[in-house]
Image (spheres, helix red, strand yellow):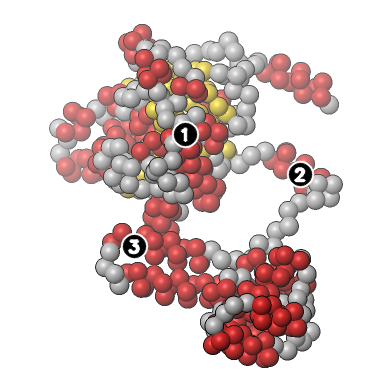
Amino acid sequence: MIEKTILSSLLQELQYARKVIPYIDREYFRETGDQIVFSLIKEHFVKYNSLPTKEVIYIELDNKNIKEIFYNQATETLDSLNPQPADVNWLVDATEKFCQTRAYFNAISKAAELLEEDDVTLYHKSLDMVSKALAVSFDSDLGSDYFESAEERYDKYKEGYEKLATTFEIFNKVTKGGFVNPSLVVFMAPTGVGKSLFLCNIAASYLQLGKNVLYFTMEMSQTQVEQRIDLNMLDLREDQIKILEKQQFVHRVVNLKKKFAGKLKVKEYPSGSVNSNHFRYFIEELKLKEGFVPDVIVIDYLNICAAANTSKNAGLYEYMGQIALELRGLGQEFRCPVFTATQTNRTGTKAEDFDATDIADSWGVTHHADYIYGIIETEDLAKMQQMKVKRLKDRYQDYRSWYPSFVIGVDKSKQRIYDINIEDDNQMNTHEIDQELKELM
């Protein structure tokens, strides 16, 4: 019944048609005749930006070279349509419910057929179909009116970006309050310098702040990641952990759990085998089975992820750039920052200093990242247990004049980075900032 009501309304309600046609799929209609008529209505609407009459559809149907059985079914559908005035708001709501129900039914049916093939590789494909079906909805947001939204816009300016501060004073200082939520944060370093070190510290930091952290690892094993977190959180070296009795170790971890309200989930995947869709499925599964929703996502690391929407035959520039784009989209979807890392190229590996052009594989990564931090370790810095962190991109701050670089302490035996008190001559002092604000007022 609802199918005929939808088709009838598409022949007379222009406002209704403009709202719903972009979201209705031909396959939502069960009968072939309905599918054909809908296709003809949509085709006319897209081409002429107006609604066809029944007579126009009859003519278009005659012009189509289709089998007699399908022609007769489409004619029966057209004969049954009887446009009647109806409330547009009700029509839109009823059509949205129809689309959601049919999309879900179709997805379940197709997924069941795939799973019957007993091919484990089709599991994620079937899950993807169901996930997309569950996401079907009409977008009623028509954007903002520049002149009419002035007050709302001003309030947002005063509120500023939503940010997630860390336990590291220096990162909070250079970002002026924490990382914008959502955003894509990339740590860039030569092989073996400290990409995973920084990512594990970010995870430990937010865990201590009571956040739910999800750590995807493709480089280290799940146990190696958890061991680094143990060294950091328990303030122990590896040799000290090994001499602890099992009960002593468990007791210390239990005390950490009582102290910090956050949760940490670590998931290991083979290198190069997963993309943003796999991460998305896993997050949905965690939410469904355990009620776990991440506040922070850590992906170790970008270069050994796969791209979901670009062929592996594409050039590295396009392929790696697409991975960065998809990871940023993941953060936007789940409203949380995504932290990852990338390697330097050969030039950057041997240099005692580098910039964003030294990123490995793809300069395209820099286009999609919101923050990029270069991690530099020289012999002199290593002797002092320090690393230099160079700000290579910050979408929200002037990183060239406000702390363009800083030094951070490193204790690799405990897999920990920490703040050290070093003044930076490049920072603006409080008096200068206050003076600038006074001149603006």
The residue tagged with tag 2: helix, strand or loop? helix
Give whichever of discs 3 and 1 has the lower sequence position.
3
Q: Are marks 2 and 1 in contact (CB under 8 Å)?
A: no
Residue 243 rendering spot, x and y as whole percentages: 15, 32
Query: Is residue 370 shown left or right of residue 388?
Result: right
Residue sitting at x 40%, y 42%: 313
Is 42 in front, or is 334?
42
Disc 1 designates what residue?
A: 317
Residue 290 rendering spot, x and y as whole percentages: 38, 60
Give whichever of discs 2 and 3 has the lower sequence position.
3
The residue tagged with tag 3: helix, strand or loop? helix
Label 1 is placed on what type of residue?
A: Tyr
Q: Which mark is residue 337?
A: none
Residue sitting at x 61%, y 70%: 24
Which of labels 2 and 3 is toward the front? 3
Disc 3 designates what residue?
A: 123
Assess disc 3: are there few (<14), some (14-19) or many (≥20) residues with their C-alpha within 10 Å of its C-alpha. some
Q: Is residue 372 above or below residue 390?
A: below
Disc 2 designates what residue?
A: 153
Label 3 is placed on what type of residue?
A: Tyr
Residue sitting at x 50%, y 67%: 133
Alpha-carbon distance for marks 2 and 1? Answer: 37 Å
Residue sitting at x 26%, y 40%: 221
Residue 206 rendering spot, x and y as whole percentages: 44, 39
Is 101 in front, or is 397?
101
Give whichever of discs 2 and 1 has the lower sequence position.
2
Q: Splitting the image into 4 quarters, where does residue 202 fall?
A: top left
Query: Is residue 96 shown left or right of residue 259?
Result: right
Label 2 is placed on what type of residue?
A: Arg
Residue 18 rendering spot, x and y as whole percentages: 73, 67
